[in-house]
Amino acid sequence: MKYLSILTIAPLVGALVVAVMPRSKPTLAKQVALLWSLGVLGVAIASWFAFNAGDGGLQLRESYTWIPAWDAKFTFAADGIALVMLGLIALLVPIVILASWHDAEGSRRSVPAYFALLLALEGTMIGVFAAADILLFYLFFEVMLVPMYFLIGSFGKDVLPKQRQYAAVKFFLYSLVGGLFMLAAVVGLWVVGGKTFDWEMLVNADMSTGAERWLFLGFFVAFAIKAPFFPFHTWLPDAGGAAPAGVAALLVGVMDKVGTFGILRYCLPLFPEASRYFAPLAIALSLVGIIYAALLAVGQNDLKRLVSYTSIAHFGFIGIGIFVFTLQAGSGAVFYMLNHGLATGLLFLVVGMFVYRRGSTLVTDFGGAGKLVPVLAGVFFFAGLASLALPGLAPFVSEFLVLIGVFKVNVTVAVIATVGIILAACYVLWMIQRTTQGTLNPVLSTVDGMRRDITGREVLVVAPLIALLLGLGFYPKPVLDVINPAVEKTLTHVNVVEAGK
């Protein structure tokens, strides 16, 4: 079965189907989008069972002729790292669709357009992770900006129109500039790599040290902007703060992982010497991001911007996990990518539920909300604990693996990163205390939405994420068995796998 091409094309077809539905039938558009995304989830589950977890190489390969003169093909393949991210996308999109049931209401744009854009975003994100042709990867890397741009610029409801348009343009321009760096590197790689875009052939290409380092920088800058790493991070708080909560969950929970995935799939195997050469710089940027973003998060009054800053700090942990080149840290970094998507996705969605009820994203407009919506406040507390990597929850396992792997190589880096964990506890717990605990803000009692605790639909939204965070926290083996061989294979390309054992 052609799993990866189906996973890529099906959401795009669904987007077209939903887009042509009449604006007068918004409920039908929502239902079709939800059912279509559940069908994609079913194919993703089938691909998981078809995957050989013990093989760290690319599997489920498909290749179709595209541009023969350039040796460019529609080639799809996945290793364990890509498979985990494909599963995360397929899981989060139906959850986000369900969570976003009322997000497009009151917008000048049509409801079908909103949910069509969500499906289009799903298809393009899947294409990025499934592509095994460099040019095809670049194509999806750029095209996925389009639905996200319109989702932020047209459907953001919690900020003024000028603010969301500014955030959308800033997101687009940052990503576009990064894409231009990558395009130059893609062309250069085609020239020095034997005039092919096939990943498996380029891995074995022979290139000079100078060419390798320049090409590495072209890819790394694009991926560092996408992740984002410090100092390329400034677009994320604006975009995360302006986007609807469900869209922000996909932006931070999945789309940003393209950056760290790209480093693992392209920078390390294709440019091993340059990866080792620039590793100290990448680790330094990651450490600065951990501390800097944590300090900025503490001072935020906007809930969605606060959660966005926490994600920048988390990406710092993923960065050091990748560039210390140990098996434990690398596996922890990939597992962190999955767990961050689950935990931060849950946190954004719950924040969206609070914002929908209160009509405000400001922390100071809440206070004591747990007295009115105790169950929703409890879910918010759980999401916060998952974000700060409480033992017993899945993010703790990934964070622990990263730190153990880092300690083997550089104790100083590990100690500085640990300070970030302490700061994470501060900004998360303070956020929860200011919104749901303490004295009840009298204004909340007059807000109709704050009198309604978690609904049945919202239970369906949060329940799968809570179950996975708990289940993978106590038994991460099924996922780590898929991740470990792929990470070991990647480190073999960098010629440092022995450090991880």
Image: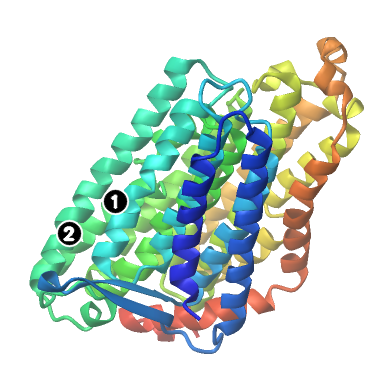
**Left or right, residue 144 beside residue 386:** left
Q: Is residue 233 visible?
A: yes
Between 47 and 24, the one lying in front of the other is 24
Q: Residue at x 77, y 67 (%)?
A: 471
Return the residue at label 1: 222
Question: Element type at marker 2?
Answer: helix
Query: What x and y, as percent, mark residue 261?
Result: 42, 63
The quarter of the picture where residue 260 lies is bottom left
Question: Element type at marker 1?
Answer: helix
The answer for how far apart the CA atoms under marks 1 and 2 are is 10 Å
Does residue 352 lie above or below 478 as drawn? above
Q: Residue at x 28, y 81 (%)?
A: 200
Q: If you read the primary sequence from the N terminus, does the residue marked by circle 1 or circle 2 appear first?
A: 2
Query: What x and y, as percent, mark residue 499?
Result: 43, 81
Between 186 and 486, the one lying in front of the other is 186
**Left or right, residue 466 beside residue 109:** right
Q: Residue at x 34, y 56 (%)?
A: 140
